[in-house]
Each structure stands twice: as C-alpha cells, then as structure tokens.
Image (tube, rainbow, N blue to C red):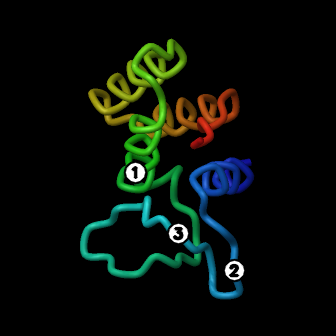
Amino acid sequence: MSAEKNVKIAEYIGMQMTKIGWYDAEEIIVLPNECDNTFDDLLFECDWNWLLSVVSLLNESFDENNLDFESLRCTIQDATITNDLRLAYNGVFNFIDKNELPTEE
C-alpha cells in the first residue's frame, strides 16, 4: 500500500517515471548532499527530508485560509514533535488524496 501512496504523492508533485527512475524535474525533493534529481526508489514514507519537501510545496501552493491545509499543518506539527513519520506521511497522503493543486492561469 505504501508503494501506491508513494506513486500518488510523486505524481502529485510532478515527478515522472522514466527509464532511469523517478525524475524530479522541478527539484522538489531537497536532500542534503544530493545533486541528482532522478531516484530509483520513492522514500516519502521513510525519510523526513522527502516528506517535508512535499509539505513545503503544499505550503507554497495552498492559501492560508484553506482549512484542510490548516489541519495538515497541525498534523505535521504534532508528528514532528513526537517524531512520528507515519503520522506525517498519512496526513500528507490524505491531504493530497482530497485536494488538487491550484492551476496557474
């Protein structure tokens, strides 16, 4: 199930599966000491850097008055305080599952 969720998150942030792996054209995933933007595996469920890169994108994309995002923000805060990556991951996935990124006009 995590693999399906990871794919949905990756596609949501614009990553694409290529012959050489998952390509992050927009360089959303911010990793320390990483200079490549193609990945063999999607690690949203097991790496805070991956997941918080998605949260940063969501933070930039959604209006402050979006109640769903405020709920996600609270979930992320609770998850970081308790170091509960699974809580944060599920919160991000549930948010993405219910919302679409605003289209640019």
Give the residue number, with chain letter if any, for mark 2.
18
* Neighbours of disc 2 within 10 Å: few (<14), some (14-19), many (20+): few
Q: Is residue 80 above or below residue 52?
A: above
98 lies left or right of 92: right
Is the C terminus in the top left, top right, bottom left or bottom right quadrant?
A: top right
Label 1 residue SS? helix
Amino acid type at circle 1 is Ser
The numbered mark at residue 53 is: 1
Furthest-front residue in view? 105
Rendered residue at 61%/73% (across/down): 22
Give the residue number, with chain letter if any, for mark 3.
24
User: Which percent across, then down, holds residue 38?
Assistant: 52, 78
Q: Quadrant of residue 35?
A: bottom left
Pick the residue in front: 45 or 49: 49
User: Which percent across, then down, holds residue 101?
Assistant: 60, 38
Rendered residue at 47%/37% (across/down): 61
